[in-house]
Image (cartoon, rainbow, N blue to C red):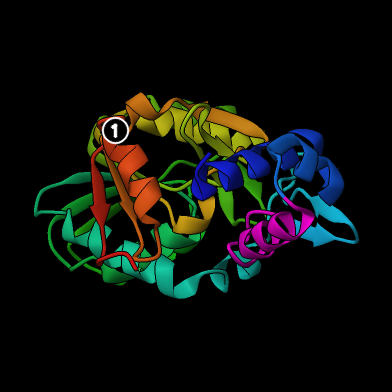
Amino acid sequence: MLVEERQQKIVTLVNERKSIRVTELSTIFSVTEETIRRDLEKLEKEKKLLRSHGGAISITSSDGLEIPYFEREVTNVNEKKEIADEAANQVVEGDKLILDASSTAWYMAKNLPDIPLTVLTNSIKVAIELSTKKQITVISTGGTLLSKSLSYVGPLAEASLDSYHVTKAFISCKGFHLENGISESNEQQARVKKKMIERADTTYLMVDHSKFGVQAFSPINNLQVIDHIITDSKVSKQMVKQLEDQLLHLIKVKKYS
């Protein structure tokens, strides 16, 4: 088993069980405990799990709670800005867009040129950011406000999306799993993002390297609904190969290291 594959399976096990011990992982994968500890150290640096005394615990929330917006703004900032910049490059004059309530979408909104566009969003911060760009028409979904993410969700937000059809949707997610698809920590956000994908001709998934191999609480959809994946320069060669093997179109911001 390749190192990348073992580490991906470790993340899956941790997320499924919520916690697991080094000794058990050592037995499962037939490697030394020291090897497992190195794996866990690497995965913690990539923010895929948390190490604990004698093992690891999941960072995905089983109660569906969201990470506050101010925390997401300072997590993997450089990678998100790289992705957001490339996402903005995919936009042309006259596009009708959906932007979700992710911090990456907010960075993308900052990068969008002031050209004739229509942007539909459930994000208060995205709407405010675009309000100064006179040629961009901004439509807010409305709905139930989630204060932590400053976003609208719920039946009204979903029904609002049904009223529109866009050329491109740009969404992010908490988890990207080769077998189980894309997922979110919050069920209401997952439902809104699923609807966003349905209303777009083309869907771009904006996902930094730390999300690969992660399965969050609420599924959004399988990988086949994604047309393009935009990721940062830290994505591993092994992950790139796995994505290409599944015929998924990957847009790398820079050469991976």
Could you tell me residue 87's position as x and y percent?
26, 57
User: Is any part of residue 84 visible from this angle?
Assistant: yes
Choose between 118 and 175: the one closer to the eye.
175
Q: Secondary structure at mark 1?
A: helix
Residue ranking furthest to the left? 93
Which residues fall within the magenta stretch? 32-49
Q: Is residue 140 above or below residue 29?
A: below
Choose between 52 and 81: the one closer to the eye.
52
Could you tell me residue 156's position as x and y percent?
54, 30
Magenta: main secondary structure equals: helix
Q: Is residue 222 magenta?
A: no
Q: Which residue lies under the disc numbered 1?
A: 245
Residue ranking furthest to the right? 53
For the point 68% across and 35% down, which residue is it?
217
With 59 as the anchor, is 248 left or right in this view? left
With 78 as the anchor, is 25 left or right in this view? right
For the point 42% across and 63% down, which residue is it?
106
Q: Is residue 17 above or below residue 88?
A: above
Q: Is residue 66 above or below residue 38?
A: above
